Structure formats: C-alpha cells, structure tokens
Amino acid sequence: DRRLQQVAEIAKSFPDPQELERFESTAIGGWAGWWIVNEEVSDAWRQNRRDSRHTNRAREGFTTAINDAIEHLQQRNVSLEGKLRSRNLPEAEREFYQWEIARNEAIIERRTEELQQFATGETAEAVPVMQGEAHELDMLVRSRRDDLREDFFAIFRKYSELNRARAELKRLEANLAARKEWLERYDAQHPQ
C-alpha cells in the first residue's frame, strides 16, 4: 500500500502539456542588405511533444492498473460472499471471510479516491530535472513498479497456498471424523 501511495504521488507529478509555438524563425543577415528568414520546428515544441506522449502513456498505465486492482478486489469480494453462503462453514473461517471483505472494501474505497484525485488533477508541484536525472527517475519508477508487481504476485501466491492448505486441512478433518466414527462403531460391535 505504501509503494502504491508512492507511485500515485509520482503519477500526480507528471507535467501537463504546454501550448508552444511549433515553428521558430531565425533571421540571418545576408549580403547586400538582404535578410534570410529561416523557419524550423522548435526544439522546445519537439521536447514538449515527447514529454506529452510519455506522460499520457504513463497516466493511462496508472489509471488502468488502479482500475484493474479495484476490479480484482471486487471479484474477490463476490467470491468470498459466495463462500459465506455455505451452510457448513466454520465460524472462524466465516469471521475471516467477513474481515477480508471489509478490508477489501476499504482498499477499494481508497483506490477509488486516489483515482478520483488523479483524474481531477490534484497534482503535486513538478520540478524540472535534467535529462540524465530524468532517465534515472524513469528507471527508478520502472524498478519500483516491477517490485510492486512482484510483491502483488507473491501475495497472490501465498494466498493460493493458504487456500490449498485450508482445503487439505478440511480433508484431513473429515478423514479424522470418519475414522473416529468407525472406531466408535467398531468398539460398539466388538466389546472386549
């Protein structure tokens, strides 16, 4: 959650596109009083265009990732609510599922709020950086994003392992109950 907050703060700092003149004119003194006017595409306009494309792609990626996270949590809650409808669910498991649904709802609310803040343009103050620093920042953001993705996958793997362990425990408990029942019947049929 803390890393996602950091990524959201970085995403809020993306610069807005600027309206710049596309062409710039340069006048060069010529021979015998003639002036040569040279019009060419402005370097600042080109840089702004590159920045805008990169920013738009990053904003779309952030928005898509948040929406995917919200959708995943909503699907998870639907699954958990289906499990809660089971009649043979132990009370401890029922409480855990209810706790997880409440936690997921709080996360969904927080993600929706972050997405709303991002969409309304409540941005942090942008600080201009040099090209080398910008590249390092870009690499840092990519590294953090990859770390965050790996953390999410690790959480999902561990949760899957937990579900497998629960299923195995249920199977073992059912086996134990069946064995106890068999022993009781056996003892009743063969008193010694």
Image: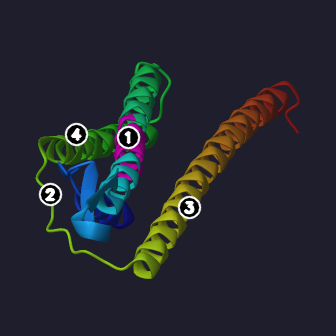
Which residue: 37% across, 40% down? 60
Which residue: 68% across, 39% down? 173
Question: Residue flagged by tag 3: what amino acid is it?
Answer: Asp
Sequence-first tag of 2 and 3: 2
Quarter of the image for residue 123 reads bottom left
**Magenta part of the chain:** 54-67
Which residue: 19% across, 52% down? 18
How far apart, in angstroms, are the residues tagged by discs 1 and 4? Answer: 15 Å
- Residue position marked by numbered label 4 in the rendering: 112
Colour style of the rendered protein structure: rainbow
Judged left or right of residue 19, residue 50 is right
Nearest-to-viewer mark from 1 and 4: 1
Sequence-first tag of 1 and 4: 1
Relative to 104, residue 131 above or below: below
Question: Residue flagged by tag 4: what amino acid is it?
Answer: Thr
Relative to 88, residue 117 above or below: below
User: Which disc number belongs to residue 146?
Assistant: 3
The question of residue 59 being in magenta is answered with yes
